[in-house]
Image (tube, grey):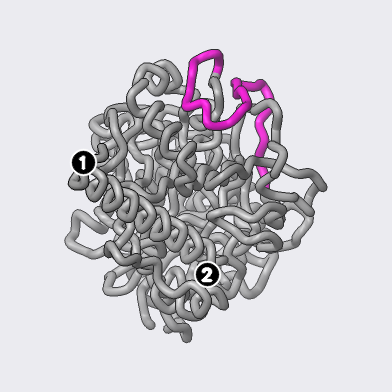
C-alpha cells in the first residue's frame, strides 16, 4: 500500500498541531484531494474537526490501546483509496504512555507508518534558539525522519527572517510560517476543545479560516512532495470482517443475526455523546447488527426494535438539565435495562445511567450519583473484566483510557465491570443484568470479541422479544388478552 502521508508533530502540547493538521486537511481537500484524517492517541475531539475538514471519518491510531501491530493496518483501513493521509500527533513528539518509553508516542506512530514528520514549533518567544530545539528533535531518534518545520505564532517579518536564517544554518527546511490568528482558535473548556457537534456552524467557519491561514502560510506543494516520499507500507489493511473471523469467539458465537434478522443496536449521539471510535460501529455492523443513532437530547423514544444499547462518552455534565428534562427517553432507557436488555456504557454513558448527575435526575439504572469534580482523571489503564457481562467475559483483558472531571459514588457496584492492574490496582464500574457501565474508554479493534458478544446478546434479546410478541398475539386471538 502506497499512500502519501505526513505526521504533524510538535515539541509540546499547545504548539499548534491541531491548527496546522486541520488546516492542511481542509486546504488539500479543497484542492480536490481525498484526504484521510488520523489522530495519534485516544483523543475524541480533534477527529471531529478532522472529519469536518475532509468529509471522512476521523480515525485514531493508538499504539497503547490497540497495540503497535495494529497501527499500520488500521491506518491502511482508513486511508484506502485516498490521495493523502495526515496524522495529527499527540502531546510532544516523543511523549507517550507514562513510564513506557516510546509506547503510544507520535514518534512511535511515525516509525510504524514509515511517515515523514513535520514539526510545528511555537516560535513566539525565540529566534536563533529554534535551530537548537529543532536539531535536538531531529537527532534524538535517527529512525524518526524529520522532513521540515512549520513555524507558528511568528510575530513579524523581522522575526520570520531570523527564524529562517537559523534553520537554514541547521539545514532544516521551513515548510510554512503562520502568524498569530486568534480569530480562528476553537473555544476550549474543562476537557479540551468544544466538540464540533456542539458548535457546528461556528466550527465550519473556523475550519475554513484554518484552511485559508495554512494555504497562505504553508508551501503546500513542498508538503505534498514530502508526503509522496513515504515508502510503501508492507501490511494488510484491517477490516472488521477479518478481525471478527479471526477472533477465538467467532466460532462459538458466529454472527449476531437472530431468527428475526439483524438486531437493532441503538448508539447514543448528538451534542452530549460525541465520543466514539468509527471502528466500533463498523465491527457491530460486520457482526450482524443494524446500527442506528439516536440523540438523548431530542429523541423521546429508543429507535424502533432496539435490542442493544451503546452509550459512549461525551459531555452529559454540560447538558444535564436537558438530558434530565427528556423524561420519556430516561424512562425508556430504564425500562430497557430493567428488562435485561444489553447496554454498553462508557464514561458519559455511565453518568447518564446513574440516579443523578449534579443533582439532576438521570435514568436511575444504577444506584449511584455523579457530580462534577475539581480533579481531572486522565491516563491509560490496563484492565481485566471481573464480572461476566453482555460486553465481556470474565477474564477478558483490555487496555483503555480514562478522561473525565466527574466522580460517581459509589465507584463500583456489587459486580464491578473492570479490575485495573496498572497503574494502580482497583475495581471500577457496574455490571447488573445486561448492563456494563464504566468510566473506561476502550477500542474494540483491540478485542473484536466484545463486538461479537454484544451483538449476540442483542440478537438473543431480539429473539426473546419476538417470541413474547407471538405469544401475546396468540393470547389475544384465543380471547385471553
**Mark 2 surroundings within 10 Å by alpha-carbon count, few (fewer than 14), some (14 through 19), many (20 or more):** many
Q: Which mark is residue 254?
A: none
Return the residue found at the far front.
479
Q: Position of residue 264 (x, y in %)?
A: 31, 53
Q: What distance separates the C-alpha of mark 2 from that of mark 1?
A: 61 Å
Front position in the image: 259 or 456: 259
**Is 47 placed left or right of 365 in the picture?**
left
- Position of 125 relative to 381 (above/below): above
Residue to which mark 2 is pinned: 71
Write down the quadrant of residue 463 in the picture.
Answer: bottom left
Q: At numbered mark 2, what does the secondary structure look like: helix, strand or loop? A: helix
Q: Residue at x 50, y 47 (%)?
A: 344
Front position in the image: 337 or 46: 337
* Span colored in magenta: 358-379
Task: Say which of marks 2 and 1 sits in front.
Answer: 1
Q: Position of residue 478 (x, y in %)?
A: 21, 46
**Is 370 placed left or right of 259 in the picture?**
right
Residue to which mark 1 is pinned: 479
Amino acid at each position: 500500500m502506497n499512500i502519501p502521508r505526513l505526521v504533524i508533530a510538535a515539541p509540546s502540547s499547545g504548539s499548534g498541531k491541531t491548527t496546522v493538521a486541520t488546516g492542511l486537511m481542509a486546504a488539500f481537500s479543497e484542492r480536490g484531494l481525498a484526504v484521510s484524517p488520523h489522530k495519534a492517541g485516544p483523543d475524541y475531539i480533534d477527529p471531529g474537526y478532522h472529519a469536518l475538514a475532509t468529509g471522512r471519518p476521523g480515525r485514531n491510531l493508538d499504539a497503547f490501546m490497540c497495540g503497535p501491530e495494529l497501527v499500520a493496518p488500521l491506518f491502511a483501513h482508513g486511508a484506502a483509496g485516498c490521495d493523502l493521509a495526515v496524522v495529527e500527533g499527540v502531546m510532544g513528539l516523543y511523549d507517550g504512555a507514562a513510564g513506557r518509553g516510546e509506547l503510544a508516542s507520535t514518534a512511535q506512530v511515525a516509525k510504524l507508518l514509515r511517515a515523514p514528520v513535520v514539526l510545528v514549533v511555537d516560535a513566539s518567544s525565540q529566534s536563533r534558539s529554534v535551530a537548537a530545539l529543532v536539531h535536538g528533535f531531529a537527532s534524538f531518534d535517527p529512525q524518526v525522519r524529520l522532513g521540515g518545520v512549520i513555524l507558528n505564532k511568528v510575530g513579524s517579518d523581522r522575526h520570520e527572517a531570523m527564524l529562517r536564517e537559523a534553520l537554514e544554518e541547521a539545514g532544516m527546511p521551513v515548510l510554512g510560517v503562520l502568524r498569530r490568528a486568534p480569530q480562528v482558535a476553537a473555544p476550549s473548556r474543562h476537557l479540551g476543545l468544544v466538540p464540533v457537534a456542539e458548535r457546528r456552524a461556528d466550527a465550519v467557519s473556523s475550519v475554513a479560516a484554518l484552511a485559508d491561514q495554512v494555504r497562505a502560510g504553508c508551501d503546500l506543494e513542498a508538503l505534498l512532495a514530502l508526503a509522496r516520499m513515504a515508502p510503501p507500507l508492507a501490511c494488510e489493511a484491517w477490516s472488521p470482517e477479518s478481525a471478527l473471523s479471526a477472533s477465538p469467539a467467532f466460532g462459538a458465537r458466529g454472527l449476531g443475526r437472530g431468527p428475526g434478522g439483524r438486531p437493532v443496536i441503538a448508539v447514543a449521539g448528538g451534542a452530549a455523546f460525541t465520543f466514539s471510535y468509527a471502528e466500533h460501529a463498523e465491527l457491530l455492523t460486520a457482526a450482524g447488527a443494524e446500527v442506528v443513532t439516536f440523540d438523548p437530547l431530542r429523541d423521546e423514544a429508543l429507535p424502533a426494535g432496539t435490542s442493544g444499547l451503546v452509550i459512549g462518552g461525551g459531555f452529559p455534565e454540560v447538558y444535564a438539565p436537558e438530558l434530565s428534562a427528556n423524561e420519556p427517553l430516561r424512562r425508556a432507557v430504564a425500562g430497557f435495562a430493567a428488562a435485561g436488555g444489553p447496554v454498553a456504557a462508557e464514561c458519559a454513558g455511565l453518568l447518564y445511567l446513574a440516579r443523578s448527575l449534579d443533582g439532576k435526575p438521570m435514568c436511575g439504572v444504577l444506584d449511584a450519583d455523579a457530580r462534577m469534580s475539581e480533579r481531572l482523571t486522565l491516563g491509560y489503564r490496563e484492565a481485566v473484566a471481573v464480572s461476566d457481562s453482555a460486553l465481556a467475559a470474565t477474564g477478558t483483558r483490555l487496555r483503555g483510557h480514562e478522561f473525565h472531571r466527574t466522580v460517581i459514588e459509589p465507584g463500583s457496584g456489587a459486580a464491578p465491570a473492570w479490575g485495573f492492574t496498572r497503574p494502580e490496582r482497583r475495581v471500577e464500574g457496574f455490571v447488573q443484568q445486561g448492563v456494563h457501565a464504566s468510566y473506561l474508554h476502550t477500542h474494540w479493534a483491540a478485542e473484536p470479541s466484545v463486538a461479537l458478544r454484544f451483538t449476540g446478546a442483542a440478537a438473543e434479546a431480539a429473539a426473546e422479544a419476538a417470541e413474547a410478541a407471538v405469544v401475546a398475539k396468540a393470547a389475544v386471538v384465543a380471547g385471553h388478552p
